[in-house]
């Protein structure tokens, strides 16, 4: 098995699920007491979040590029950035290392296309929903992407930072997400991408009338498949 390198901590709540899922999938594939070969670099999210809020993306990118270099030095052969939003600086990470980065949006788009869908709603941070770095990548993979209205985007973003990243899961917020999902479906979404790795801590298949695409799980599945592709 190739050694996976996880750039995590954004937030650690979802990074913990990455670790759990990668190991569970490896055990399912290989059996017995097998677990994943991986190294993890977990950054301080407070620093990264401040850079996000202040628009200091170059500095955020430098932090994650340093993390990527440390993972490569530790033996990582395939990198995962365990957050959708920070794929805004994926190019900085790729330029810093010689090993490949498994892009989260590509893994997600592959799953959507495999399900036979082309028009999807996108939930995530305001950065992910409103900027082109993620929506554009999905569109380049052949998808039509719908996002909530301004009020919906604001509520989805608020819940992520004020609740989910702090380990808080509230029924009221789940109800709010259900309403937003319903609005996206009414607008033509055939499925909905949970485009923040924390969102799947809050909602699941029972909360949506159309298929959901939980990006952390899909990313982990793609990573294990790639890590085992040469003989697992």
Image: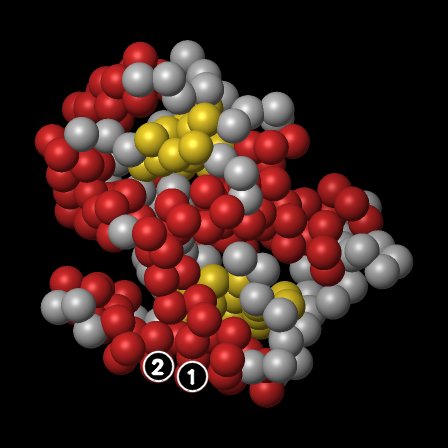
Q: Are marks 2 and 1 in contact (CB under 8 Å)?
A: yes
Residue located at (50% from left, 80% from top):
95
Residue located at (65% from left, 31% from top):
114
Q: How many numbered callouts?
A: 2
Is label 2 in a helix, a strand or a loop? Answer: helix
Closer to the observer: label 2 or label 1? 2
**Residue 217 in the figure: left or right of residue 175:** right
Q: Position of residue 71 (x, y in %)?
A: 55, 79
Residue 23 appearing in the image? no
Q: Position of residue 206 (x, y in %)?
A: 42, 16
Q: Position of residue 52 (x, y in %)?
A: 21, 64
40 vs 231: above or below: below
* Rendered image: mark on residue 66: 1
Quadrant of the drawing holding the C terminus: bottom right
Distance from the alpha carbon under mark 2 to that under mark 1:
6 Å
**Residue 228 in the figure: left or right of residue 3:** right
Quadrant of the drawing holding the N terminus: bottom right
Q: Between residues 21 and 113, which one lies in front from this camera angle?
A: 113
**Residue 45 in the figure: left or right of residue 195:** left
72 vs 126: above or below: below
Q: Position of residue 210 (x, y in %)?
A: 45, 17
Q: Between residues 139 and 106, which one lies in front from this camera angle?
A: 139
Is label 1 in a helix, a strand or a loop? Answer: helix
Residue located at (88% from left, 58% from top):
231
Query: How would you rate the neighbour count of disc 2 (Cα within 10 Å): few for under 14, some for 14-19, many for 20 or more?
Result: some
133 vs 2: above or below: above
* Rendered image: mark on residue 62: 2
């Amino acid at each position: 098995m190739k050694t996976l390198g996880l750039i995590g901590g954004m937030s650690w709540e979802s990074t913990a699920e990455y670790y759990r899922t990668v190991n569970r999938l490896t055990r399912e594939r290989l059996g017995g007491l097998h677990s994943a070969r991986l190294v993890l670099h977990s950054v301080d999210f407070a620093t990264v979040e401040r850079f996000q809020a202040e628009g200091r993306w170059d500095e955020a990118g430098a932090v994650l590029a340093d993390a990527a270099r440390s993972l490569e030095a530790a033996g990582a052969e395939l990198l995962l950035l365990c957050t959708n939003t920070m794929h805004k600086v994926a190019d900085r990470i790729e330029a810093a290392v010689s090993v490949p980065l498994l892009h989260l949006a590509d893994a997600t788009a592959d799953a959507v296309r495999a399900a036979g869908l082309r028009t999807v709603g996108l939930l995530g941070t305001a950065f992910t929903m409103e900027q082109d770095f993620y929506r554009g990548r999905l569109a380049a993979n052949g998808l039509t992407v719908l996002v909530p209205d301004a009020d919906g985007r604001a509520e989805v973003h608020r819940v992520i930072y004020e609740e989910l990243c702090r380990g808080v899961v509230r029924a009221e917020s789940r109800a709010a997400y259900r309403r937003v999902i319903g609005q996206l479906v009414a607008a033509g979404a055939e499925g909905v991408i949970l485009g923040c790795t924390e969102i799947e801590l809050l909602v699941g298949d029972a909360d949506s009338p159309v298929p959901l695409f939980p990006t952390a799980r899909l990313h982990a599945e793609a990573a294990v498949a790639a890590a085992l592709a040469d003989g697992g």
